[in-house]
Image: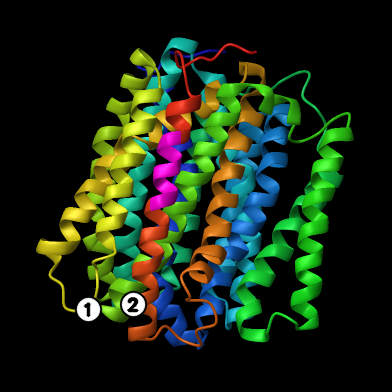
Amino acid sequence: MTLRYHSARGRLVLVAAILGSGMAFLDGTAVNVALPAIERDLHTGFAGLQWILNGYLLALAALVLPGGALADRLGRRRIFITGVIWFALASLLCGVAPNTEILIASRVLQGVGAALLVPASLALLQGAYVAQDRGEAIGAWSGFSGLTTIIGPLLGGWFSDTVSWRLVFLINPVLALVTLYVAWRWAPESRDAEARPPDIAGTLAAAAGLGGVVFALIEGPDMGWRHPAVVVAAILGVVGAVTFLLVEFRSAHPMLPLGFFRRRRFAGVTAASVTIYFALGGLMFLLALQLQQVLGYTALKAGASLAPVTLMLLILSPLAGKLAARIGPRLPMTMGPFLAAIAVALMSRIVAGVSYVGTILPAVLVFGLGLGFTVAPLTAAAMSALEDEHAGLASGVSNAVTRVAQLLAISVLPFAAGLSGLGRVETAAFSHGFSRAMWIAAGIMCAGALISFLTVRGPMQAKPS
């Protein structure tokens, strides 16, 4: 069944997809703001904060491709609903975690649920709408999902300041109930009759590779680079990454068919996604800490200070989706990251004593403008880079590369900026490293603009090459 975007049922399918993916996006932004409160309550250090984010991202990045493949094979609505239930139950565990270790383990379980529901939400849209309406639907999905990133920091800050950071997780089951009702009632089922079976070997290799690299980068500065655990983790990471490539190259049913990277559009969009979301993931992690631990903002004030970004994302994303559908994604995917890079460079000036209106707000507004013209065209280009029957795979690849980029950013960017190994987030050392990290992130965001300019050509729906 294919629906029109402006039909009543078409709008309800969009609502289900937004609510489902919105839980994951809400968690990402709200948890960032709640990190200082978690640090105080559970007595964790900087490495612990990295693991609270990376435990979730590690599971999501390693499993999102199999999640997209399962959506194609078993049914996009079925996998979406399964992911929503899993994510809600894992959120309950996060909300009652008594210590850092159990919270990190629960975050890993959350990542498993997100690996099912996030790619399935996009694949649900790709399979539900007629071709000419998909760009507008994905643009609306990007914009309204961005609304959760407005609510996320505000709720995360308010909960952390007035009640407890635990409510950041406990709100998810409420959203899940509404999502399940709408999806079960109105979302049509769609699948690929020729979808490949899950790639178990590739999944295990990817998890080992990512896990090893992340462990070495986070724990190396604290434990010492020659510590046996760090050395073993680094070796495991390299072996896992090489094994993943070999498995995917030789497998009859790879979860990431490497042949798709011969297509210029697919390779270009993937590379652009990695650079853009690397910069974005590292920025949001460090900025929330800088505002609270260095500038002395409350959690609520820190969340509210970033609200203009997501307000602009909400307003501009549907317009950017329509623009990309009309003229192609190259121009918005070039200018958007370039504007965002300027904003990130401006954020290097956010240090103790600066005013919000004079220093922070200008950077936030330019950043919102840049993201507003980036996210929807980038998402739509990623979804249209493969044929419709590979909608789950396209969604899975899009989500996998963005989560891998964010995962590595939270590990690599602090290391490159000299922040790794901090026992706690201290004012002087952290602030100097933050400014260095913003300049690095700005350069990486510019690389995303350049990649888009050089590789993303033609109309939204790329022809296989």
Q: Is residue 445 magenta?
A: yes
**Left of 388 or right of it: where is 360?**
left
How many numbered markers are drawn? 2
Q: Is residue 389 magenta?
A: no
Quadrant of the frame with the C terminus: top right
The residue pinned by badge 2 equals 431
In the structure shown, which secondary structural element does the residue marked by tag 2 occupy? helix
The residue pinned by badge 1 equals 352
The answer to whether one can see residue 72 in this image is yes
Question: Magenta residues, as a range?
Answer: 443-450
Other-residue count near label 1 (Cα within 10 Å), few / some / many at <14 / 14–19 / ≥20: some
**Left of 311 or right of it: where is 286?**
right
| 66 is higher (above) or lower (below) than 389 | below
Q: Relative to the observer, which residue lies in front, 111 or 237?
A: 237
**Left of 388 or right of it: where is 125?**
left
Q: At which x and y percent is residue 131? A: 49, 12
Three-letter code for the amino acid on which mark 2 is drawn: Ser
In the structure shown, which secondary structural element does the residue marked by tag 1 occupy? loop
Q: Residue at x 23, y 66 (%)?
A: 349
